[in-house]
């Protein structure tokens, strides 16, 4: 049932947002440059990698040594708008149609984080990652990593059709309010370096 809802709603969204997506892609190309899409390997179900696709939100500005500038310096006002409105996430509907992702589930993070998870934290990969999730409607990037992972695992243990419907509905409200877009002092979130408990052991 969950997979049927994922495919059905994604197809409806592509039809409904088809023209706006084309216009948005044109604006991204004009304001931020090419390529329009940002692609990156992310861990999916059971940690298997897949290519996640999003709209780009940063420029490709580099320092004199050729290295990319920090995220905060490459994130323009237009890029911040894309993130605040979650419009940059819309291409992930393609990942949902392909079966890499679900509409609801723990957000797919970086492949680099896989060896840093505790056994409990790694349980977030027992389900397909989602465009939105329980952590996103309970604080998004304003949460600490430990808080976010606890919410992800709570979803794994308590997932249901009705919970997914609740999360989708609350996601719409969260996007309209534009709450929890970034962590304090960060463009998005600081890198995960392992849980505090593991460092203390």
Image (tube, rainbow, N blue to C red):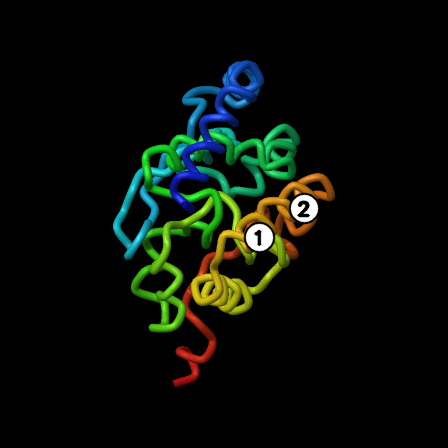
Q: Residue at x 41, y 51 (%)?
A: 109
Report the residue that reaches farthest toward the bottom: 201
Q: Residue at x 71, y 39 (%)?
A: 176
Residue 34 picture quarter: top left
Q: Which residue is mark 1?
A: 136
Above or below residue 142? Residue 12 is: above
Of label 2 and label 1, which has the lower sequence position?
A: 1
- The percent position of residue 114, horizontal first and vertical second, equals 32, 60
Q: Secondary structure at mark 2?
A: helix
- The percent position of residue 101, horizontal first and vertical second, equals 38, 43
- The percent position of residue 122, horizontal first and vertical second, equals 35, 65
Above or below residue 21? Residue 201 is: below
Q: Secondary structure at mark 1?
A: helix
The answer to which of 154 and 6 lies nearer the viewer is 6
The answer to which of 201 and 105 lies nearer the viewer is 105
Above or below residue 122? Residue 73 is: above
Q: Which residue is mark 2?
A: 174
The quarter in which the N terminus is drawn is top left
Question: Within 10 Å of the Cα at label 1, are there few (<14), some (14-19), or many (20+) other Cα atoms?
Answer: many
- The percent position of residue 72, horizontal first and vertical second, equals 57, 42
Q: Is residue 72 left or right of residue 152?
A: right
Question: Within 10 Å of the Cα at label 2, are there few (<14), some (14-19), or many (20+) other Cα atoms?
Answer: many
- CB atoms of marks 2 and 1 within 8 Å: yes
Measured Cα–Cα span from mark 2 to mark 1: 8 Å
The answer to which of 132 and 64 lies nearer the viewer is 132
Judge whether residue 43 can be spotted in this image: yes
Q: Is residue 169 left or right of residue 6?
A: right
Q: Residue at x 63, y 58 (%)?
A: 138
The answer to which of 58 and 144 lies nearer the viewer is 144
């Amino acid at each position: 049932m969950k997979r049927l809802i994922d495919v059905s709603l994604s197809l409806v969204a592509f039809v409904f947002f088809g023209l706006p997506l084309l216009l948005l892609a044109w604006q991204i190309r004009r304001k931020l440059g090419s390529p329009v899409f940002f692609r990156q390997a992310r861990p999916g179900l059971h940690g298997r990698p897949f290519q996640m696709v999003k709209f780009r939100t940063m420029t490709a500005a580099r320092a004199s040594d050729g290295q990319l500038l920090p995220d905060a310096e490459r994130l323009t006002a237009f890029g911040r708008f894309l993130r605040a409105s979650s419009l940059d996430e819309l291409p992930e509907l393609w990942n949902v149609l392909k079966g890499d992702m679900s509409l609801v589930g723990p957000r797919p993070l970086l492949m680099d984080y896989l060896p840093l998870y505790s056994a409990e934290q790694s349980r977030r990969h027992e389900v397909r990652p989602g465009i939105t999730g329980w952590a996103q409607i309970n604080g998004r990037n304003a949460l600490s990593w430990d808080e976010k992972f606890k919410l992800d695992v709570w979803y794994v243990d308590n997932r249901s059709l009705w919970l997914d419907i609740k999360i989708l509905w609350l996601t719409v409200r969260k996007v309209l309010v534009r709450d929890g877009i970034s962590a304090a002092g960060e463009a998005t979130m600081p890198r995960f370096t392992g849980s505090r408990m593991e460092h203390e052991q």
